[in-house]
Amino acid sequence: MDDKLFKAINQLAGSNRLFDYLMVSVSQKMRYVFLLIFIFLWFRNKVYRKAVYIAGLGSILTVLAGLLIKPFYYRPRPFVRRMVRLLPPVPPRESSSFPSKHTALAFMAATSIIFYNRLLGSVMYVLSLLTGLSRIWMGQHDPSDIAGSAFLGSFMSLFARLAGMKMIK
């Protein structure tokens, strides 16, 4: 299933310059879109400032969880195991495919916001899905890496929310 879904998505890479450009841009630039959203929310009001604080805590927890997982669970990237259509920038061959930091952080951000603004959080989830899709399109992650990273980021956001609510009142 993982291989079939990967091939269905990755085979599209290289067939359309515009879509390739869009996918690479989504992969590399979505973090800045989320950062702009957080800056806007920070200055909006106290409730949203709390959401941004929790997202910041969630970011730290998500990155730390990824750093802890990688040494204990190594998974070769798709372009190491098989022929793929690989779009630059290309990560190091020896780096683990799981978790996808891009995807985990995107889902952490979306989950952090959905509790405070359903519409904005939903839009961020769609952007997070596009981020995960772009990582498969570029040949850097398998669909299961993306699904696991989405779960990891969402879970870290919930954990940060529980911890953050006790720290800030």
Image (cartoon, grey):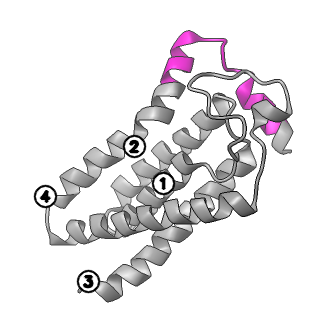
Residue that mark 1 sits on: 105
CA neighbours of label 1 inside 10 A, class few (<14), some (14 to 19), many (20+): many
User: Would you say the residues marked 2 and 3 are in contact, meaning their CB atoms lie under 8 Å apart?
Assistant: no
For residue 168, the mark is 3
When asked about the image quadrant of residue 60, the answer is bottom left
Q: Position of residue 78 (x, y in %)?
A: 77, 36
Front position in the image: 123 or 96: 96
Mark nearer the N terminus (2 vs 1): 2
How far separated are the C-alphas under marks 4 and 1? 22 Å
Residue that mark 4 sits on: 43
Q: Nearer the viewer, mark 4 or mark 3?
A: 3
User: Would you say the residues marked 2 and 1 are in contact, meaning their CB atoms lie under 8 Å apart?
Assistant: yes
Magenta stretch, residue numbers: 4-22
Q: Is residue 82 above or below residue 123?
A: above
For residue 31, the mark is 2
How far separated are the C-alphas under marks 2 and 1? 8 Å
